[in-house]
Image (cartoon, rainbow, N blue to C red):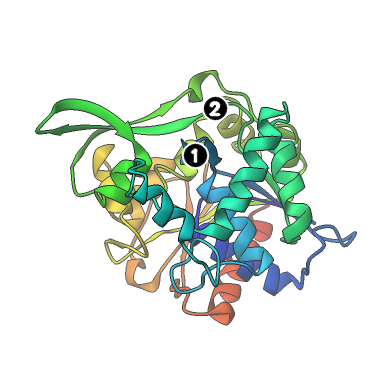
Amino acid sequence: MRIVVPAGGIGGARFLRGLKTTLGIGADHDDGKTTITVIGNTGDDITLFGLRICPDLDTVMYTLGGGINESQGWGRTDETFVVKEELAAYGMQPTWFGLGDRDVATHIVRAQMMAAGYPLSAVTEALCDRWRPGVRLLPMTDDRVETHVLIDDENGRRAIHFQEWWVRHRAAIPAVRIIGVGAADAEPAPGVLEAIHEADAVLLPPSNPVVSIGSILSVPGIREALTATTVVGVSPIIGGAPVRGMADACLSAIGVETSARAVAEHYGPELLDGWLVDEADDGAHVAGIEIRSRPLYMKDTESTAAIARAALDFALELK
């Protein structure tokens, strides 16, 4: 069985861990029976201090490889911040994005390989050779795509990188518009379209529908390929609020209500065949999309595995 999961950061990574658990997949992503291909969001990527940082790819890699800081859901476990402190002592900017020492090593390897001419997909494969996440992790594109946010503040109307809006400002400044810079000219990374075409099921985890899943869908060819297969999504909204993070601020920026029903409508029946919502949203109905409800809080590995199994069974039934 071939499963494809377009995924963002923390929610996507934890869902994937649950999916691996329910399928009994270990460090090897191909046991001859079941494979999981992850199409990772790269719209959050940013270059800082001469290093190319890929937060969502790394969060998936660390989470599935056993190196994630579990309490915060991102970054490395047992992390130290000596490099960050030294950069601050030199007055280097920005100071609002802190890189841990262990994490810096990943970014140095990535930066050196990319400077040598390797595409991001090849670099990601090389990094995964160490972490053995048990999935095939592909970036959505090898081309440079970055999510920027148009805001109005005391400096007037301007665009800032998504990471500055999200990390520095905690999305407290209302977004006028969210822009995928470079997305329109990007191409899917090698293997992405093939994986979708060969998939028995595609699962959309409870990742941010605007800047995670939305960024992946913005790469020409990916959404079109997904409409030709069976796709089941898991709602990131429970009872009118994001399960985690500030997805409501992103949804407001594109004029979408923060509700399970509205997110399903945003994706549309052309993309979604099935939509898994929490019991709190049991009354949600969207024309053309099969909707089912169950508890969706990912409290621990067991509950997350049950959610992943429900989504997979739903997709296979619809197929």
Image x and y of residue 38, in percent = 66, 50
Residue kind at label 1, given as amino acid type: Asp
Which residue is drawn at the image coordinates 73% and 53% (left, top)?
128
Horizontal and vertical percent position of residue 15: 56, 64
Q: Residue at x 59, y 30 (%)?
A: 224
Q: Which mark is residue 45?
A: 1
Crowding at label 1, few (<14), some or many (≥20) Cα neighbours within 10 Å?
many
Q: Is residue 199 visible?
A: no
SS assignment at label 2: loop
Q: Is residue 80 left or right of residue 175?
A: right
Q: Residue furthest right?
A: 32
**Percent position of residue 298, x then y:** 48, 73
Is residue 260 rendered to the left or right of residue 185? left
Q: Residue furthest left?
A: 154
Secondary-structure class at tag 1 = loop
Query: Considering depth in this image, is 159 or 222 the residue closer to the camera?
Result: 159
Residue nearer the viewer, 253 or 148 = 148
Gap in angstroms between the C-alphas marked 1 and 2: 8 Å
Mark 2 neighbour class, 10 Å CA radius: few under 14, some 14 to 19, many 20 or more:
some
Q: Is residue 267 visible?
A: yes
Q: Earlier in the sequence, mark 1 or mark 2?
A: 1
Where in the figure is residue 145, as x and y percent of width and height? 50, 29
The picture quadrant where one finds residue 176 is: top left
Closest to the observer, 88 or 228: 88
Residue located beneath label 2 in the image: 144
In the image, residue 26 above or below residue 246: below
Residue at 41% x, 59% y is: 236
Which residue is most to the top? 185
Number of labels in the image equals 2
Q: State if disc 2 and disc 1 touch (CB < 8 Å).
A: yes
The residue at 75%/45% (across/down) is 125
Q: What's the residue type where badge 2 is placed?
A: Arg
